Image (cartoon, rainbow, N blue to C red):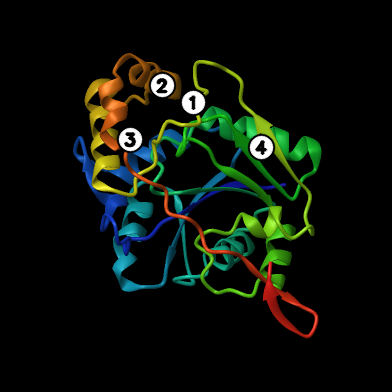
Amino acid sequence: MTTAILITARLKSTRLPEKVIRPIHGRPMICHMLDRLKLAQRPQKIIICMSTVAQDDPLEEIAVQESVYCFRGHPDDVLLRLTHAADQFSVDTVISCTADNPFVDPEYIDRLVDFHLEHGYDYSKSSGLPLGAFAYALSHQAMVRACEIKAETDTEVWGGYFTETGQFSWGVMQVDDPSVRWPELRLTVDTLEDFELVTRIFDELYKPGQVFSLAEIVALCRRRPELVAINAGVKQKPGRKIRVHTTGGEGDG
């Protein structure tokens, strides 16, 4: 059984263009993310999943330079792109994360894989980690089924197909460790303020060739509330409402 991390990545972001390749301490942000993800023990592969649009060519170059796999697929249908990537690389269990989350934690990826497989869920997620520090686990078969029932081609946000349709089994892994539990802490990168916070964290903790832990990030932010204030006013964009095919036509999910 093959488990792989699939990273959704694009360069057409509107709020902060080309954010995933913006440099932090001399390296593109996504490269720092890869340093962290390579520490996960349970997945056998890391695949950057980008679009076929020429604008994303630099991401393919990064995949080669960083010795990870890449897949190019549908520009807007992210769920279909991930499903086709899993097809091509014969992946049974997908760990999904996005390139605007440079602090996805490898230890909790491993824990999520174990949780997901132990319970035999179609879809698993965690609760309690900072926003941008967690990933999702999916079975390939469930992804194929979700692509069959969805009535949208814009699937940038796709979790609802697994949690709202009643057609899939899913579970939530609770994270209670106080050293990393802080669900209100925003560590994702959508805006310039988000990027400034991430850069400041690197300024405080980064040493070349080393990966600082999520516990160190959380401890720093608890110690330095002025850092948390940098992006405290940023609002997360709401996702699109899912729509699924119904008997006789399309309908809202």
Q: Position of residue 228 (x, y in %)?
A: 32, 28
Residue under label 1, please give it: 182
Q: Which mark is residue 222?
A: none
The Cα–Cα distance between marks 2 and 1, rounded to whole angstroms, is: 8 Å
Q: Is residue 62 left or right of residue 48?
A: left
Answer whether labels 4 and 3 touch (C-beta < 8 Å).
no
Residue under label 3, please give it: 232
Seen as rendered, the residue at the extreme front is 233
Seen as rendered, the residue at the extreme bottom is 248
The Cα–Cα distance between marks 4 and 1, rounded to whole angstroms, is: 21 Å
Q: Which mark is residue 113?
A: 4
Q: Earlier in the sequence, mark 4 or mark 1?
A: 4
Q: Position of residue 182 (x, y in %)?
A: 49, 25
Q: Position of residue 234 (x, y in %)?
A: 33, 43
Q: Is residue 67 left or right of residue 6?
A: left
Answer whether labels 2 and 1 touch (C-beta < 8 Å).
yes
Disc 3: CA contacts within 10 A as few (<14), some (14-19) or many (>=20): some
Q: Earlier in the sequence, mark 4 or mark 3?
A: 4
Answer whether labels 4 and 1 touch (C-beta < 8 Å).
no
> Foreground mark, 2 or 4?
2
Q: Earlier in the sequence, mark 3 or mark 2?
A: 2
Identity of the residue drawn at 73% across and 66% down: 145
Q: Secondary structure at mark 4?
A: helix
Q: Which mark is residue 218?
A: 2
- From the image, which quarter does the C terminus lie in? bottom right
Q: Position of residue 97 (x, y in %)?
A: 50, 47
Amino acid, disc 2: Val
The Cα–Cα distance between marks 2 and 4, rounded to whole angstroms, is: 23 Å
Q: Secondary structure at mark 2?
A: helix
Is residue 64 visible in this depiction of the protein? Answer: yes
Amino acid, disc 3: Ala
